Image (spheres, grey):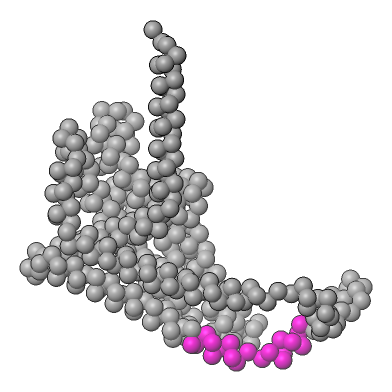
Amino acid sequence: MITSKIISNGILRALATILVIALALYFLYEIQTVIVYLCISLILCLIANPLVQFLKNKLKFGNSLAATTTLIIFILAITGFILLFVPLIISQANNLSLLDTNHLQQEFIQSEKSIETYFNIQHIDFDKVLKNPKVTSLLDFSYFTAFLNSILGFMADMGMGLVSVFFITFFFIKDQDAFKISARKILPDTNEDKILNSITKINHFLTRYFIGLLLQLTVVFILYFIVLIIFGNKNAFVIAFLCAILNIIPYIGPIIGTILAGILTMISLIGSDFRTEILPTTIYVIIGFLLVQAIDNNISQPIISSKSVNSHPLEIFLITLISGITFGIVGMIIAIPVFTMLKVILKEFFPENKIVSVLTERI
């Protein structure tokens, strides 16, 4: 018989459960930066696994030495990546210094007069307007200071983030065997084998996925580089590398890369005739990039991604599209790894389910 005491106890338990869940979610929200560091470290650990195994098995490195060597390689790669952009920035700055500002000012004045004549607008003296006390009082230049402070804050956070990620990654690589032993002790005996099998398979598939992603980016980089070399871009290597990195973002990244390549191509040709050199070359580069994207989207990306995680290309496309619509750019980037993890877990715990068996038949 249900009494008021039982009902009140049930309500109290429900409220307590909701409170605990709310506190847990709030705690996770507060430590979201740490969670991001952990996720990045796990990804780096997965990418580093083949190298670590090579160092340990072939070169007989110990855990600490293998982890240290791997981190040094990562640091050198990041440093090289940053140094790649120094020549690009210098060259683009030099190109901008050649810009004829007087010519641009004359063209702007001429365009302004044409617009005023066409729309029968009274001439506006912008110098006089800007010197008006009422206008200057409305202008708040403090945002420049805020902008500089935000840049300094971002650099400080980035430095702290890199140190934290490398510190966590070092111990993930060094003590991964010890972590597995500790996990075996903590996990419930009834599901221990299933959980450990899931972790092993997830590790295997995600390692293959990230290696496949690196292979795909390499193919795109080579094709971009060829396009830029054909049209005589002096910074072909750096621009191709940057645009290839942007391909990590599905669908949107290639568009950003194409626009960026067009802008950098125009800047690199400053001083040449706009109609006969700058505009045609920029159009050809954009067309070349679009052809590369067509090859990547229809050939290399579906084949490499589907082979690395044993999923159908249409399945990958739909999951990426749905994740992008639901969670934006971040969702598109993590869609395939998360979906692969879910498939592995579902197959390990619910192998008899018909829907699960259909979705995971390739795993």
Above or below, 209 relative to 270: above
Residue at 41 percent of width and 38 percent of height:
21
Q: Is residue 91 magenta?
A: yes
Q: Residue furthest top?
A: 1
Q: Residues in magenta?
A: 90-108
Q: Is residue 170 left or right of residue 222?
A: left
Question: Can residue 128 be seen here?
Answer: yes
Residue at 44 percent of width and 46 percent of height:
26
Above or below, 153 relative to 307: below
Front-most of residues 252 and 164: 164
Q: Is residue 328 left or right of residue 40?
A: right
Question: Can residue 314 be seen here?
Answer: no
- Residue 274, how many percent across, how many down? 64, 83
- Residue 208, how many percent across, how many down? 26, 55
Which quadrant is home to the N terminus? top left
Residue at 44 percent of width and 86 percent of height:
87
- Residue 332, how many percent across, how many down? 44, 53
Above or below, 29 relative to 148: above
Within the image, what quadrant is residue 330 found in?
bottom left
What secondary structure is the stretch in magenta mostly built from? Answer: helix
- Residue 171, how many percent across, how many down? 21, 62
Within the image, what quadrant is residue 33 found in?
bottom left
Q: Is residue 142 magenta?
A: no
Front-most of residues 172 and 245: 172
Residue at 36 percent of width and 45 percent of height:
339
Q: Is residue 316 left or right of residue 280?
A: left
